[in-house]
Image: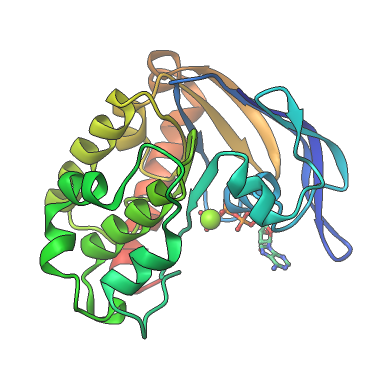
Amino acid sequence: MLEVKAIDVYYGASHVLQGVSLTVRAGEVVVLLGRNGAGKTTTFRAVMGLTPARRGDINFSGKAITHLPPHSIVRAGLGLAPSGRRLFGALTVAENLALAERSDGPWTRKRVLALFPKLAELAPRRATFLSGGEQQMLKIARALLSQPHILLLDEPTEGLAPVVVRELGGWLRGIRDEGLAILMAEQNAHFALALADRGYVMEKGRILREGTASELLTAPELATHLALGSRQRLAKNNGMA
Ligand SMILES: Nc1ncnc2c1ncn2[C@@H]1O[C@H](COP(=O)(O)OP(=O)(O)OP(=O)(O)O)[C@@H](O)[C@H]1O
Ligand SMILES: [Mg+2]
């Protein structure tokens, strides 16, 4: 379904991704693991056409999307829920949803609100006042309303309390059970591997290892990634990084 083949991505002269390859098949949940600065967000930006690859190919459903503009990539069926606070904060929840909505697919506003009933209650609230978990819901809801065949989730657990992380796991299982493919970037390997079929470990702009979720859980290099990831995460959540 999604095939990333040996892409090289630069920010100016800085050569950030070096020969990154990965695949996501229809209905699969795939995780991209890696520490801060490994290149996860850059991979997503390249797939979505936001920072196009300088070398290599990206195919989706058999068609080359490598050099398409972002709006055409969204129309081709790729939906991104970006990391951080990438919402239109001055707009209400309802306005954020209306802006993202495309009517030519199965994800109607009604269906998305059935998945996230809380968003219906929050409809008149400005996005800037939402909690971390509510923002995550809104980002996923917006991505679904663009009628994707694959959902790219960049660090969905970032900044969420453990109880909200568990809730997020439930939402994502629901979305997966609808048959949507998911590519997720995460530092929280335990969370991601509990959900994923397969995964990749990234380091310094390269894929270090790939395997099934159970292979990766027992991979020796993941022990350091897991430990480091959770330490960085703690520091981030405590406002220290
Ligand atoms: N706009 C930019 N200009 C120059 N360098 C950048 C830019 N954005 C990211 N980088 C660099 O590219 C590398 C990969 O960054 P990227 O954001 O892809 O990592 P990441 O794996 O998503 O990290 P995190 O877990 O912290 O989100 C890092 O060295 C980063 O400093
Ligand atoms: Mg990132």
Q: Residue shown at 42%/45% (left/top)?
A: 187
Q: Residue shown at 12%/53% (left/top)?
A: 117
Q: Residue shown at 30%/60% (left/top)?
A: 138
Left or right of 18 on screen, residue 2: left
Does 124 appear above or below 165? below
Q: Position of residue 46 (x, y in %)?
A: 70, 48
Quadrant assignment for the C terminus: bottom left
Front residue (pair 221, 50): 50
Tally of numbered tags: 0
Front residue (pair 121, 22): 121
Does 210 appear above or below 203? above
Kindly give the residue lying farthest to the front in the view shown.
Answer: 104
Q: Position of residue 116 (x, y in %)?
A: 18, 51
Left or right of 215 on screen, residue 230: left
Left or right of 163 on screen, residue 37: right
Left or right of 201 on screen, residue 60: right
Q: Position of residue 195 (x, y in %)?
A: 31, 27
Q: Position of residue 102 (x, y in %)?
A: 45, 52
Split into quadrants, the picture shows ligand 1 in the one at: bottom right
Q: Is residue 155 visible?
A: no
Does 43 appear above or below 212? below
Quadrant assignment for the N terminus: top right
Q: Is residue 109 visible?
A: yes
Quarter location, residue 101? bottom left
The colour scheme applied to this rendered structure is: rainbow
